Amino acid sequence: MCPVSVYGFVTLKLRNTGATVPATYTWSPDYRTVTLTPQSALLPSTQYSLSIGGSNVTDQAGNTFQAGTVVNNFTTQ
């Protein structure tokens, strides 16, 4: 993955407000895996949305993420 293409296009948001949850990105040595870590603990019993911004996210060669935009919604315990 191209790190520059991920910032702002792989996001974690609160579902009720749409506010972005501040997080840090950590890359594997080969840049094939990125880990998104919230800067503080997630709130209990709260709905979140993790989004990967489709054609904005590219690999090192400039190829776009073929799945389109992917959104995963979840609720913390």
Image (cartoon, rainbow, N blue to C red):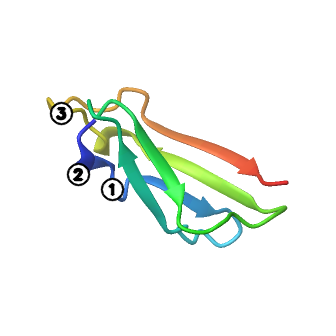
**Location of residue 18 by image quarter:** bottom right
As helix, strand or loop, the secondary structure at mark 3 comes to loop
Look at 18% across and 33% down and name the residue there. Answer: 60
16 is higher (above) or lower (below) than 76: below
Q: CA distance from mark 3 to mark 1?
A: 14 Å
Identify residue type, mark 3: Gln
Residue 56, image x and y in percent? 30, 45
Tag 1 residue: 7
63 is higher (above) or lower (below) than 8: above
Q: Earlier in the sequence, mark 3 or mark 1?
A: 1
**Location of residue 46 by image quarter:** bottom right
| Mark linked to residue 60 | 3
Q: Residues within 10 Å of mark 3 (few under 14, many from 20)?
A: few
Q: Are the residues flagged by discs 1 and 2 in contact, CB closer than 8 Å? A: yes
Q: Earlier in the sequence, mark 3 or mark 2?
A: 2
The front one of 35 and 1 is: 35
Image quarter (top left, top right, bottom left or bottom right) of the C terminus: bottom right
Tag 2 residue: 4
Q: Residues within 10 Å of mark 1 (few under 14, many from 20)?
A: some
Look at 84% across and 61% down and name the residue there. Answer: 45
16 is higher (above) or lower (below) than 56: below
Q: Is residue 2 left or right of residue 68?
A: left
Q: CA distance from mark 1 to mark 2?
A: 6 Å
Residue 61, image x and y in percent? 14, 29
- Tell which residue pokes out farthest to the front in this image: 29
